[in-house]
Image (cartoon, coloured by chain):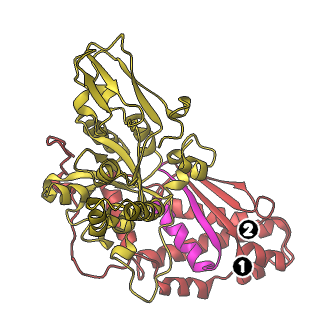
Amino acid sequence: MTTGWKYARPAKERLMTLEAPGKELLFDADKGLVDEISAKFSPGGIAREVLGKSEEQVYQAMEKLGKELMELTIKLADGKYLDRTGEMIERVYRQTGISFPHRPQRYIELSILGLRPADRWNITKSTTKELVLQVTSCSIRKALEDAGTSGLPCKAFCIATFQAAAAKTGDRVQVELTKTLPQDGVCQFCITKV
Amino acid sequence: MCVWCEKYADGYQRWYFNPANYARKLYKVRKEEAEATGAEGSPMAAGGMALLTDEFLQAWDRKDYATVDKMKQDIEKLSWAAHFGQVVTLEDTLKVIDLLYPIAIMTCVCRRSMLGLPDEENFTCIGMGPGMYKWERWPNTYRGGVQFLTPEETKDIVTRLNKRGLVQTLFTFGTPYIGGICNCDYPDCAAIRTTLDFGVRTLWKGHHVAQVDRDLCNGCASCVHRCQFKALSFSPSQQKAYIDQFQCFGCGLCVTECPQDAITLVERASLPALADVW
């Protein structure tokens, strides 16, 4: 970027211009991606996977399922259902060299939309150092509770999912659960770049 | 405290230091019907400046103050919900840049319409936050293109533009989501014009106010041309700079110009008479 004029002037080699004015571009998550993930993973199915297992086995199973969900999400999001938001995130990354937070955030969001589209969640911080995700209504926790599983073993599932997303994008992160359902009214995950 | 801090600061010193006001989801599930891309889908197009219609100006010209007042209230209400700005100091702007990503420089819609500047000479506005990944959704707004920047590049540009006399303002795009840093001056900026010339507050004053140390001021008047808000003047009888603090927006441009360091910024809230003047 040069600023020789009173205002700024873009660097020609980095200026992105409209490639196909008038062409419809698809920025939102494809319903097909949601359907394909939902067909293979469901909160009820996850709860059934851990029924009758010891606490340690439950945590291990949760981690395994979390990684599998993210593997499927990445495959679909970067393949059959690649959308314009994903393409632009990659282009911006190539220009600025900044991967975190949005490259992993993209996979995280798509995995949530795919597995539990009706859950209530939000992104409350999204800087180049920290990503904060809050889940206020969680169908996985509800399914585990309904199945009689005690504690919050699903945190292993979420954390494994987020770590798998960051591993794919090459971002070294630390994931912490700083607030938990139901006592805090929210599960809050702080994903910090290390 | 400004009303936006009361509503949206959530424990932070100012509402624009709250990272939640810059964070958004990247995705929702695609709808079957086409997305809105016109005024109904663009907070900027639906915002306050665009609402200052011919009808308002005609009422203004015929001095129909009742109509003007009613329209002004309606415009401000819509603007504050969809798209309004607040002046920020350079120091605060540099802090804000670390709270968000991505960042891109783009053309200024105000200068396009007010000055008729061609796109290639009109890169002054900074779009930011996850919405910038979808810039192609609004081809007319972004017809000049965008260049994505690192936070450090952004800080460098903003600092240079400040040095050249442009005021930093933060703009909401669906309040409280803050999606732009504008680099404004009078009369290019539509928000400054509607606020100063018509009293329609689409731009709020900042959290600071400038004051002159009359003992240090040497009367050089170099600060006067920096003020974009008609708050700074030169008193020929006293040979000193004079700041109308009720008119000051607290941008700090005069501070950085003064060779004597005679002008400083103080917290608006620290001055009882000005604490509620926004």
- Residue A138 vs residue B13: left or right? right
Q: Relative to the observer, which residue lies in front, A176 or B204?
A: B204
Residue B162 in the image: above or below residue B37: above
| Residue A109 inside the magenta-drawn segment | yes
- Chain with yellow colouring: B
Mark number for residue A153?
Answer: none
Can residue B93 be seen here?
A: yes
Q: Residue at x 77, y 58 (%)?
A: A184
Q: Amino acid at mark 1?
A: Ile
Query: What segment is highlighted magenta in the picture?
Result: A102-128
x then y, percent, for residue B256: 31, 26
* Picture quadrant of residue B114: bottom left
* Of residues A134 and A101, the one drawn nearer to the viewer in this rendering: A134
Q: Are marks 2 and 1 in contact (CB under 8 Å)?
A: yes
Q: Tag 2's secondary structure?
A: helix
The three-letter amino acid code for the residue at tag 2 is Cys
| Residue A46: image tag | 1
User: CA–CA distance between discs 2 and 1?
Assistant: 9 Å
Q: Residue at x 45, y 44 (%)?
A: B96
The chain letter for the residue carrying disc 1 is A
